[in-house]
Image (cartoon, helix red, strand yellow):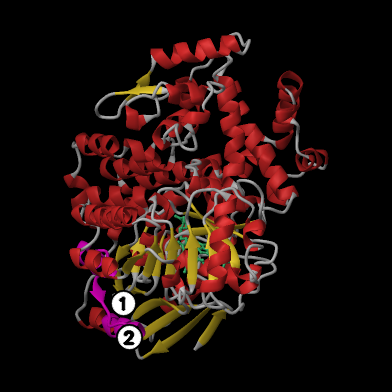
Amino acid sequence: MALISSVADLSVEGNVAILTLNSPPVNALSALVRKSIHEGISLAIGNPAVDSIVLICDGKTFIAGADITEFGKPPSGVSLRELQDTIENSPKPVIAAIHGTALGGGLETALVCHYRIAVPSARCGLPEVNLGLLPGAGGTQRLPRIVGVAKALDMVTSGVHIKAREALEMGLLDELAEEGQLRSAAIAFARKVIAEKRPLIKVRDQNSKVEAARNKPDLFVEFRKANARKFRGFLAPEYNIRCIEAAVNLPFDEALQFERALFTELMNGVQSAAQRHYFFASRQVKNIPDVPADTPLIPVKKVGIIGAGTMGGGIAMNFLSAGIPVTIVETRQDALDRSLKTIRANYDNTAKKGRLSTADVERYMALLKGSLVLEDLADSDLVIEAIFENMGVKKEVFGKLDKIVRQGAILASNTSALDLNEIAAATTRPEAVVGLHFFSPANVMKLLEVVRGEKTSHSVIATAMQLAAKIGKIAVLVGVCPGFVGNRMLAQRQREANKLVLEGPMPWDVDRVLFDFGFPMGPFAMSDLAGLDLGWIKEKSSSSTLREILCELDRRGQKTGAGYYDYDEKRQARPSPVSEQLIRDFAQKKGKSARPVSDEEILQRCIYPMINEAAKILEEGIAIRASDIDVVWVNGYGWPVYRGGPTFYADSIGLDKVLAKMQEFQADYGDDFKPAKLLVDMVARGRKFSDL
Ligand code: CAA
């Protein structure tokens, strides 16, 4: 056995050389890993006793890609391309032995090996698109040569991880090894290749599948059309498609140059920087500085939910789908029945779409119990209150829970805005109380704000964070303040949007600007969807806001066929002359006259106060780090990931510019635009959110 470096060793068994990488956590292709593979393969090629070479990894995975932490830094040492040339041109067969995930540059390395063997649990994919990139080491050229153009288009634009069995059927793998037996199976396979005098297969020379797609431009036209909505705003999917087109239409080396040029352009662009920022942000968010990783967790085997409304039902589904029994409590039988029916209908719908088996539906439903008495929650490990937002009622419920639910259980509130400390104070165990703020629809939306009260214990926080991952949510720990992180910032945008429509732009103008920025919809379309009567009380309505005026006229949003917009029978929105007139009349009543407002101002008026609020949130310690705020906005509100999140976006345009504009707006429109102290400080010191 020869140690090549701290991350690789080379051993020889009979006539097979085995090059083993061990570079935790994911054997990414750092400069040292590239150099070590290059050296190891070269040594094995030069060793006359060796007839074939196995490339295998220790640890939890095969090479999971390029080392993303090196992106943006000057290239150093052996390049991936040089390394690939050495492997591909080896006169001795090189066999990639895959476990875990062969992703990105990892799969591209496997694709220059002459053969690939994997265990059944392994997965392969080219997920660069999720980092705003394309596979820049020949992936877009070699993949379609094996799996064909249609499948390759799908893989590179979705980043999907393909299971080993499917990869075998597609020809991406040559053989499956028994689970746990990869090393011996790979060596045996290497001997077989030699004994059978199998050829040194170079994927680059396999042209039949790309030739089959030549002169068929419709393939690409159709693919773009079918995915236009999904790809909207993103550069990387389109660039990936162009590279596959090049694979079809250009000679290999020319297409490889093309791939390199497009890769470099993406790598130097702001979208990829944003998506890489998000990649690390979504991992960092799990680290809570004062809650050690070995904090004891509270086993959660039974969940109770209070309130069987849309929210309670949606929350229940998360736990049922994770195999955790749920008891849901309502005060009225008809409401309870309705909720259980809705949950089943939701599951049935998913089953109809083929995304769930009917056996699963039955299994989940068997875990669900309805009840009309709180006492049925006595032995729950976690109780989540999901009733309407009324402090008095919530305190009463928590007071009761305190007496009923066993000691050691977690008591959670799904409040989206109320003071969690006050709720916790209604119990004798405030350390057991936490906020679990789900987003609607709770069974779909990825975000979960875990709200930490003054007295919430470390175990409760750690359990909530871990449980969130178990039910497929991305949890962000936040502190107590009105609206927490997400809704507190949203309120800024909503306030400005509401003001803007009294100054000239119509709701559809504001919505268009935010849609073009990359949000799935603007604030007015969103209000219409949610229902304008959320929290509206008819008896107290006095035409004092636009929303009240619309509700009074029964324009309560999509459900009544009219809100800010008019809707046709298919719920397609169109600008409404009726609401336009109502808005103009209301503006006049308020003494506002219409003026031309540029799209740029609409965007800045809506977004900059959010950035300013993010600074206040950090100042007050409500969020742990700036990137956590970005995770909230990407997962809870559809902030386009190619813009990284509000704080990344602010950094990318320059905090000095944001501050100057806020000051200008403050002079023109008042203290809604008063800059946060932290924003002023950061600009004064030439710092960014990402430096905090
Ligand atoms: N480079 C550097 N670090 C990486 C990495 C990479 N490619 N992939 C993962 N890591 C790090 C993570 O940041 C994390 O670090 P911390 O523990 O310090 O937070 C650690 O490895 C573990 O990662 P996860 O928490 O994500 O672990 P997991 O087990 O849930 O998932 C994984 C493992 C599936 C490999 C996942 O990490 C992943 O999807 N990684 C990215 C894969 C990828 O995008 N590869 C393509 C890279 S671009 C490329 O290769 C370009 C090219 O064409 C040459």
Q: Position of residue 365 (x, y in %)?
A: 27, 66
Q: Characterize the local packing of mark 1: few (<14), some (14-19) or many (20 or more) Cα atoms within 10 angstroms.
A: many
From the image, tell me which residue sits under label 2.
181
User: Closest to the observer: 483 or 661?
Assistant: 483
Q: Is residue 452 above or below residue 537?
A: below
Earlier-in-chain disc, 1 versus 2: 1
Q: Say if residue 149 shows up in the picture.
A: yes
Q: Are marks 1 and 2 in contact (CB under 8 Å)?
A: yes
Amino acid on which the number 1 mark rests in the picture: Val
Image position of 132 (left or right of 77): left
From the image, tell me which residue sits under label 1.
119
User: Closest to the observer: 535 or 298?
Assistant: 535
Q: Position of residue 380 (x, y in %)?
A: 46, 74
Image position of 665 (left or right of 184): right
Image position of 134 (left or right of 245): right
Identify the mark at residue 412; answer none if there is no mark.
Answer: none
